[in-house]
Image (cartoon, grey):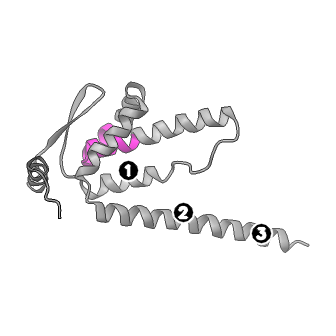
Amino acid sequence: MKQPNAEMQALLHELKEDKPYEIELGGKKYKVKYLKDKPAELASYQSLKLSDSAPESIEEAIKMAEKESGIMAKCVSYLLLNSYWKIKLFHWIHWRYLTWTMSRRALASGVIHTQIAIDTESFTIASSFLRAMNNLKMRVMKEEAEQSQVEPA
């Protein structure tokens, strides 16, 4: 079995003691602590809004790219703020700032770097349940639409 190196052991120790570590996004340094449940939950909820379908036209592709960059900025904002009051007070402006100043690649690296501080078990369980609920809702809506088309005949 491969043993973790000293750098990863030090990072794990810092996370356990809730010491902030620095990440760099777009030339600016942010300090990230162990993520609390609510910001991780909000970020996973925002990530469910990303579209899985392919665009049919160029205009639709442009709208989808704009929407996805905004959603990614919201996720990164939740993960960087990581506090109830910071999210309530600053999220509305922080995600817009990230959208306009960061590239999509920088936002994606922000998600990757903050993922280290996520309790992955609860995050994956919450995101899988949210996806399953969304699929169930869509299936029920489809079945109701099919039933309403059959009944008036």
Which residue is located at x 67 percent, y 32 percent? 58
Q: Is residue 5 above or below residue 77?
A: below
Q: What whole-number distance in Å separates the C-alpha atoms at marks 3 and 2?
A: 19 Å
- Amino acid type, label 2: Asn
Tag 3's secondary structure? Answer: helix
Magenta region = 74-90
Residue 146: image tag: 3
Quadrant location of residue 136?
bottom right
Circle nearer the N terminus (1, 3)? 1
Residue 75 highlighted magenta (yes or no)? yes
Question: Which residue reaches farthest right?
Answer: 153
Q: Quadrant of the C terminus?
A: bottom right
Q: Which residue is mark 2?
A: 134
> Foreground residue, 64 or 140?
64
* Residue depicted at x 14% and y 55%: 4
Residue 117 is inside the magenta segment:
no
Q: Give residue 139's position: percent from left, percent from top.
A: 64, 68
Residue 146 place in picture, x, y as percent: 77, 69
**Which amino acid, by three-letter code, is at mark 3?**
Glu
Q: Is residue 97 above or below residue 119?
A: above
Q: Please, what secondary structure does the residue beneath circle 1 have?
A: helix
Locate residue 19, reporting x and y percent.
10, 47
Q: Residues within 10 Å of mark 3 (few under 14, many from 20)?
A: few
Determine crowd level at label 2: few under 14, some 14-19, many 20+ residues with C-alpha closer than 10 A. some
Q: Which residue is mark 1?
A: 43
Asked whether the viewer can see residue 77, the reply is: no
- Graded by Cα atoms within 10 Å as few (under 14), some (14 to 19) or many (20 or more), the crowding at tag 1 reads many
Find out whether the residues at labels 2 and 1 contact each other: C-beta distance under 8 Å.
no
Q: CA distance from mark 1 to mark 3?
A: 34 Å
The residue that appears at 24% across and 48% down in the rendered structure is: 83
Quadrant position of the N terminus in the picture: bottom left
